[in-house]
Amino acid sequence: MRKARVVRRKAPLRARAGCPASDTILLFAKTRERLARLTDELRIALALVVVDELSYDEAAARLNIPMTALYARLAAAREAVRAMIADDERPRAVAAE
């Protein structure tokens, strides 16, 4: 009769504090949260160019909008994400007890 093999599973990445992978997961979660806060127009334009790696021509064609409108949406999306990052990094006031 064969012995059952014991498989040791590692703790989930989110449970390992200080692990570089945990930092990556946290950064990914924050990025998803920030993108979710964008309007659909901005999020879709940014996703087509950054995630799907479409050229500006291809993204504008896919959205059926002029190239200038795509430029405006991308600029607005990038500025909104920058503002969210700056806001997240701003020190918070702690309420006095």
Image: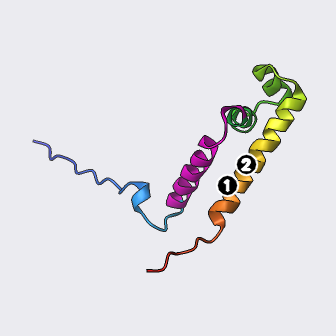
- Is 66 positioned to the left or the right of 95 in the image? right
Distance from the alpha carbon under mark 2 to that under mark 1: 6 Å
- Is 69 positioned to the left or the right of 35 in the image? right
Name the residue at 90% across, 31% down: 68
- Mark 1 neighbour density, 10 Å: few (under 14) some (14–19) many (20 or more): some
Q: Is residue 3 a member of the stretch shown in magenta?
A: no
Does residue 4 lie above or below 43 as drawn? below
Which image quadrant is residue 67 in? top right
Q: Quadrant of the C terminus?
A: bottom left
Q: Is residue 39 a member of the stretch shown in magenta?
A: yes
Q: Which residue is mark 2?
A: 80
Instruction: Return the mark for residue 48.
Output: none
Residue type (three-letter) at the residue carrying disc 2: Ala
Q: Secondary structure at mark 2?
A: helix
Query: What's the magenta region?
Result: 21-41
- Mark 2 neighbour density, 10 Å: few (under 14) some (14–19) many (20 or more): some
**What is the total number of numbered labels drawn onto the structure image?**
2
Which image quadrant is residue 88 in? bottom right
Name the residue at 74% across, 33% down: 45
Instruction: Return the mark for residue 84.
Output: 1
Residue type (three-letter) at the residue carrying disc 1: Met
